[in-house]
Image (tube, grey):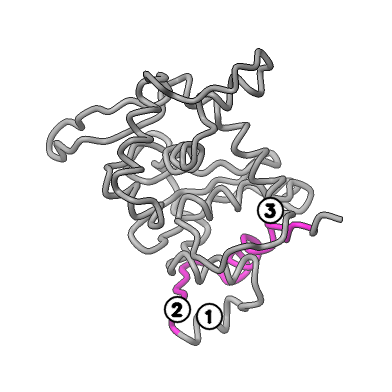
Amino acid sequence: MAGKRSYQDPCGVARALDLVGERWALLIARELLLGPKRFTDLRAGLPTASQNVLAQRLRDLEDTGLVRRRKLGPPAGAWVYELTGRGRGLEPVLVALATWGSRQPMTSAGDLSADALILALRTTFDSAVAGPLRATYRLALDDDRYLARVADGRLDVARAGQDEAATRTVEPPDATLTSSVGTLRAVVFGDLDPAEAERRGVLRTEGERASVARFVALFARPAPAE
């Protein structure tokens, strides 16, 4: 931590930025919100971050107690990074930032990572549209798998394989959507009709079409900031 830059300002905002204000820090936290990841997975989610910068930022976050590195048990045996309890305290901050940022003009034509898309779904979920709906959806996005539950006007999403208790369901899901991250983004936030996406072969669904349509309708396009 020697030589780390500081605002030297007692304000809580400044003290927070002393810890997570460096470039990539909050985006690393975004990628770890749904559970631990290997370094290669983080690289895939943040492709424009150089390997050296990403490694340094992870060390910084470890030093501040926001991220820890541990080895998974067998059969995986891989080293992963995960948020600590203190690091998980950043979740409402990230959700609020994502909600605020979604109304700003688009400045990049780059692709979203799978976890970034999940965060976008969380921040645009319309509880009024959901109403009394209780439904479960499986999302297979490229190499990532998620389980989304809608109940009591809330959307909860867990990464499959990270938390078996959270992702286990007794009943089959109401619908399963299999596609690339970009395709689901276009279906939910763009102008790609699910039926047209299926005809093109870029989206595969299981379950009743009405269930798929209900899922897509749960998310509102952010209104641009004035």
Residue 62 located left or right of residue 33? left
Q: Residues within 10 Å of mark 2 (few under 14, many from 20)?
A: some
Residue 35 located left or right of residue 108? left
Q: Residue furthest bottom?
A: 199
SS for dot 1: helix
Q: Residues within 10 Å of mark 3 (few under 14, many from 20)?
A: some
Three-letter residue code for mark 2: Val
Position of residue 23 measured from the top left corner of the image (x, y, whole percent): 49, 41
Task: Evaluate if marks 1 and 2 touch, with contact meaning CB atoms under 8 Å apart.
Answer: yes
Task: Evaluate if marks 3 and 1 touch, with contact meaning CB atoms under 8 Å apart.
Answer: no
Q: Is residue 207 magenta?
A: yes
Residue name at image x 69 percent, y 46 percent: 99
Position of residue 9 measured from the top left corner of the image (x, y, whole percent): 65, 17
- Return the disc, 1 or 2, that comes first in the chain's sequence: 1
Residue 102 circle label: 3
Three-letter residue code for mark 3: Ser
The magenta span reads: 201-223
Q: Residue furthest top?
A: 10
Position of residue 127 measured from the top left corner of the image (x, y, whole percent): 74, 46
Q: Is residue 111 magenta?
A: no
- Is residue 180 shown above or below 215? below
Q: Quadrant of residue 62?
A: top left
Q: Nearer the viewer, mark 2 or mark 3?
A: 3
Residue under label 1: 197
Q: Residue furthest front?
A: 3
Residue under label 2: 202
SS for dot 3: loop
- Quadrant where the image shows the C terminus: bottom right
Residue 109 located left or right of residue 104? left
